[in-house]
Amino acid sequence: MSDCCHGTDNWEELERGYRAMLPADVLAFIDANRAKEHSESMLIATLHMVQGHFGHLGPGHLEAVAQLMQVPLAKVTGVATFYHYFRLQPRGRYLINVCLGTACYVKGAEKVAQKLTEELGIHFGETSKDGIFSLESTRCVGTCGLAPVVMIGDEVHGPLSPSQIPTLLEGYLARAAEDMMANSASEPK
Amino acid sequence: MSLSAPDFYRSLADRAAATLADRDLDRKILIQVGSATCEHAAGSQAVAEEFARHLRASGRNDIVIHRTGCTGRCSREPIVGIQVPGQIPVKYERVNRDLVHRIFTEHIQSQTPVLKHILDHTGEALPEREFMFCEGSRCKGPGAGLRERFQALLETRGIAPQKVRAAAASCFGACGLSEGAPAAFVLARPEKVLYQVATEEDLVALIEGHVLEGRVVERLKAKQEPIALEFLERYGDVAFFNRQSRIALRNAGVVDPESLEEYVAYDGFKALAEVLTRQDPDWVISELTKARLRGRGGGGFTTGAKWAMARKQADATRYIICNGDEGDPGAFMDRSMLESDPFNIVEGMIIGGHSIGAQKGFFYIRAEYPLAIKRIQMAIDICKQNGLLGADIMGSGFDFDLEIRLGAGAFVCGEETALIRSIEGERGQPKVRPPYPTDRGLWGHPTVINNVETFANISAILRFSGGWYARIGTEKSGGTKVFALAGKVKHTGLVEVPLGTTLSRVVNEIGGGVSGGKALKAIQTGGPAGGFIPASMQDMEVDFEPLQKAGSIMGSGGMIVLSEDDCMVDIAKFYMAFSQEESCGKCTPCREGTTRILEILERITQGEGVPEDMDKLHRLSRLCQRTSLCGLGRAAPNPVLSSLKHFRDEFEAHIHDKHCPAKKCVALIRYEINAEKCIGCTICARNCPVECISGARKEAHVINQDACIKCGNCFDVCKFTAIDRV
Ligand SMILES: Cc1cc2nc3c(=O)[nH]c(=O)nc-3n(C[C@H](O)[C@H](O)[C@H](O)COP(=O)(O)O)c2cc1C
Ligand code: FES
């Protein structure tokens, strides 16, 4: 439950609180769908947008979506937990998805996965302490011809051998450092 | 005043032709760079940028960079094609920045192709001209021996192979187009002329007219062009491609997937125009039925019959859905088609919508395919802007709209009733059938669901006729099937072959056989719902029924090649783990059955199997097959049953001898250092994560078996093959 919306049962006040929790494009999407036929069928699309924005679906997000779409919270939670693509925990800046599909499996994906857990010092489902990498596995990203593959963010890498992992991670670390430098430079002191 | 469909199409085609004429591509040098997920992963975007940089620096305006989709040659990406007017197109493999520089300076600016980097290069210089002889099985009669005779004629006239080359190709898909006496098709490149020849006299005429005088021999010209002419022209010299028969993939790697004009230039939307002109859905359905087109999503249900069922419903609100969930881990043909030729799938959907009387259609695409989603959305938007979607399509009075809905990573959502629930915004749990979706589907209305590849074939069938399509396949199933070839095979990629082609041809002739010179053990088809075809049965023809008889299924087209290094118990366990994880939990046989089967398989691979396990596996599997609610549970035991059937000895070795013949199951293997081979370089000790290897420098090392975690690092790093896996 979110903290913002307790202590009142005035819908307008509640609605204002819920709206404040979601970004403008999601709100516009929900509003645009409300009048349409079968508007409740847009639940999954809405959750995709929320996750696209926040990187995960927090309890507050689910409640806000439920209230604003006028769908029971139990259903929203049910959907969010049914589909593997939805993540209920925050994740790092870069999500590393190791493909454990068939083609990757027979080409040695397990060794790549093992090297990744060693290098990052985390297990599947965890995020590195510095908040840069989260490690997860997926079943086929559809580039089986390049197996074994690892998807980092939106980028697919393959074929990979365990020995290439350190260099690959360094590239992303450097990118993250650059981004942070750029951000801190642009922020007024 | 609105135009009629034929006028609308003519004006669309004229506009497309004018746009392309403005670009004047025929007289320019084309640099063709693939742009789909695999290409991007291999670095094609950087390659395109590098070409653009060279292009700017050169200041030349007679060179164009052309974006295309995916040719389906994954293991050699990024592939770059160079087309110089009047010359045979050249493809380069594994292009990187350095090679871009060489291609640009040597090939484009100095007319000397970089032979060493040509795709599948044979080391030969490129000929000026090439004649490709169709030697598909259907042309066998007239085609037999023609190429050899042509070769002999060239030699007697002293025409060198650098001038003219004669090459063999598989079925052009042109059979059935020929009229009159049987004659074989021959494609002349780079002129892109298709001839039909039957006699020695014809061959002589080709040499004297086409080769020596440089003119088209009108008498021998084919009356109609085959569907994949452009594809053959660009890729025909590569064995991987010319042994295929491309219908569904005809535009992949040819057109810019984001250009309506290019799609139209290759006869796109011609079939739709015909459909909207005739206004006769029964004609469409009868052509599909004649074509013997069967659903490419796995079940193989006749598409014509499915459409007819939805059409005869009383309820006038109807839907059509394209199943782009592609859940089989190891399959990627649907992704490639959505990314490389999106307008073709959209056209198939509109035709389907019109034929069953639907007002609305949905693409259900998995969220893991961001580029496919983007390209389909773009195609939908462009079609709306051009009167091909929305109200009054092509001025015919037909209103139809398309929308994309995203999957969210649940394998079971590929099953049609679960998919419908997912579009409705629910948890994707399947329902009992009947009622079938054609009776009561999305929101309770009649709904047709077809696979991406099924839709990819529709426009081709209507353009070339159902009879033509049927002749390409087998007695029971017409046309071609696209396979996603992956695993331990030399050339991974997409392969489209006529149904009835042998597995061996796909894997060995087109795929180049098992990689690393290993022996073939089995071919897996159908993914988690399929089974294994042992190497001894590789001469089997691929079609729905033979595969099923062998204990597997056609599935959606994933084909994983397994070598002697793969343990069948381990792979069966892999698939069962997948199905167990993906079971939606609604029905007990599937939820509990898959869990128990997995437990037993785990026990066996841990070396703790007992003799009763095989019988237990068999009984549990049969139970799960017979009593599960949906196709997931009913098919989940297939990999186990088929491995038990064909590889019983491997199960026995694990259970009775505690031995893994493929040396894959970690609990059943051990690493040992061969003291005679070990020179004491210490590299193994340095790479051991648990420091269980000891020994002095320049002396043989030993592994402490009690501490060893069997990670295999030592085995991988040893340069003297001094470590044995036993
Ligand atoms: C567990 C399960 C998963 C499936 N996954 C897919 C899929 O990913 N893509 C697909 O087209 N069909 C899939 N199917 C088959 C569909 O239920 C349906 O038969 C198919 O989409 C119909 O299209 P077609 O007649 O063109 O083959 C699946 C079926 C089951 C039981
Ligand atoms: S199995 Fe890994 S990308 Fe398909």
Image: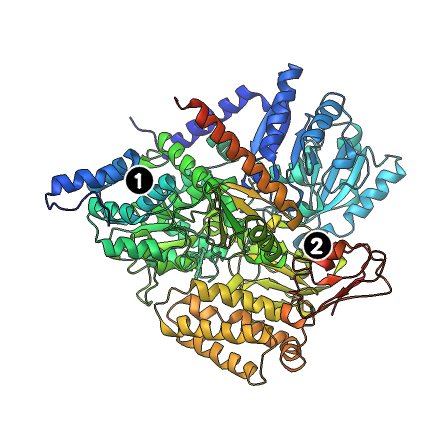
| Residue B228 can be seen in this image | no
Same chain letter for marks 2 and 1: yes
**Looking at the image, which residue sits at the far top?**
B59
The residue carrying pointer 1 sits among few (fewer than 14), some (14 to 19) or many (20 or more) residues within 10 Å by Cα, namely many
Q: Closer to the camera, B309 or B10?
A: B309
Give the image location of residue B695, x and y in percent.
79, 61
Labels 2 & 1 near each other (Cβ < 8 A): no
User: Which residue is labeled 2 in the image?
Assistant: B687
| Residue B616 can be seen in this image | yes
Note whether ligand 1 is within 8 Å of mark 1. Answer: no
Is A67 on the left or on the right of A45, as rendered? left
Give the image location of residue B659, x and y in percent.
68, 75
Q: Closer to the camera, B696 or B120?
A: B696
Is B417 on the left or on the right of A135, as rendered? left
| Residue drawn at x 55%, y 38% as measured from the top left | A172
Give the image location of residue B592, x and y in percent.
41, 74
Rendered image: mark on residue A144: none
Q: Secondary structure at mark 2?
A: helix
User: Which residue is labeled 1 in the image?
Assistant: B398
On-image quarter of the N terminus of chain B: top left
Query: What type is the residue that disc 1 sits on?
Result: Phe
Colour scheme shown: rainbow
Determine the CA span between mark 2 and mark 1.
Answer: 68 Å
Can you tell which quarter of the image residue B383 is in?
Answer: top left
| Residue drawn at x 42%, y 76% as measured from the top left | B626
Q: Closer to the camera, B60 or B355?
A: B60
